[in-house]
Amino acid sequence: MLTVQFLITTAYGAASFYLYTLIVYMMIKRWTEYNTTFFKLFIIEYCFNVVTFLNSFITLRAPQNTCKDCIFSFLFDRNSSPNEDNSPLQYFFTLHYAMAYIQYSMTFLVALNRLSMVLLVNSYEKFWRPALPVFICLVIAYPLLVTLPISSNNAYYIYVPGLLAYTTKSVADVTEVLSNLKNFMIGITVLTTVANILALIRLKCLHSRISGAERNLFTVSFVSLIIQLLALADTLVLFLSAADTASVGTQTAKVLMPFVSDLLTLNHPWTLMYFSTKVRVSMANDHFPSMRNQVKDANTPSSVY
């Protein structure tokens, strides 16, 4: 189980979530400064991404890094029967797919938030405050609905000699779920791209009315879009070349998939720290005193993002 890839992904995942958690804690502690829908979305994404990352150890990382003779292989062997109840594995496997819907949806919501900011400069927060709970309910409900065939059927581990590792399967036919997921990922990414492009065009027209702080938060959204496009491209390569598993493209996509997926999950704290002066200043003051000398002005006004 302790392969190089497993150790590397676990190490940078732990470091990222350590920073992620500190940022969220800082925001909650300074809630009067961070009480905007953009930062609320950031905190909600944090919760979803924690679930995604931890769940991946059960359905993906641990089984894919465990050989038949490995010490912990018994954990997978005792849940390898498709006929016996391996609960709650089917619920973890459901989350494996559901969180993909949720991650892509959250990236779209952030892009929509930034678009509404440049369209409704002075009133977009009034729209988002009542709308946000509705959006989040939809973001959660739809994935759980379309993945119902997985959650209502048994899941199990199976050893794949060709991979020298285990993989997670469902007794249900997940073909329709995968097809729906592919179409959803394409559709929501198109919408996210359109929202970012429209926001960029509008931003150019309102350059003098939009603060540098808000433009920085738009950059965070745009970076998430780029990463989502990369993740979508990698996923589509795997879908389209499923019949030719030995091709260079398929093998490359398989190698990149865990890292691209992690990038989609873990980029948020790093991009926000890099682009947001306010977050850097707050983190320097609250958690990293050694950073204070590197921040231009540790007394930056709270209106600066």
Image (cartoon, rainbow, N blue to C red):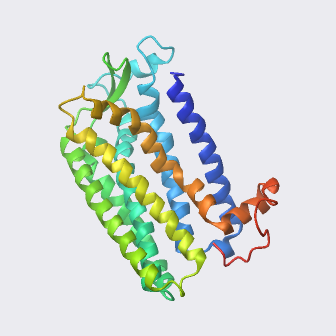
Direction from residue 101 to residue 38 in the image, left or right: right
Residue drawn at (59%, 55%) of the image: 269
Give above or below for 16 relative to 203: above
Q: What is the residue that sits farthest to the top in this orientation? A: 69
Q: Is residue 88 visible?
A: no
Give above or below for 123 relative to 132: below
Residue drawn at (41%, 81%) of the image: 202
Give above or below for 253 relative to 212: above
Task: Tell me the quarter of the picture where residue 102 sits.
Answer: bottom left
Direction from residue 26 to residue 220 in the image, left or right: left
- Expressed as whole percent of the image width and height from the top left, the position of residue 183 reads 23, 54
- Expressed as whole percent of the image width and height from the top left, the position of residue 156 reads 33, 28
Q: Which one is in front, 190 or 157?
A: 190
Residue drawn at (56%, 28%) of the image: 7
Task: Tell me the quarter of the picture where residue 270 sits.
Answer: bottom right
Task: Tell me the quarter of the picture where residue 222 sits.
Answer: bottom left
Quadrant containing the C terminus is bottom right
- Expressed as whole percent of the image width and height from the top left, the position of residue 135 reads 39, 69
- Expressed as whole percent of the image width and height from the top left, the position of residue 173 reads 19, 37
Q: Is residue 298 visible?
A: yes
Direction from residue 152 to residue 5 in the image, left or right: right
Picture mark count: 0
Residue drawn at (67%, 79%) of the image: 303
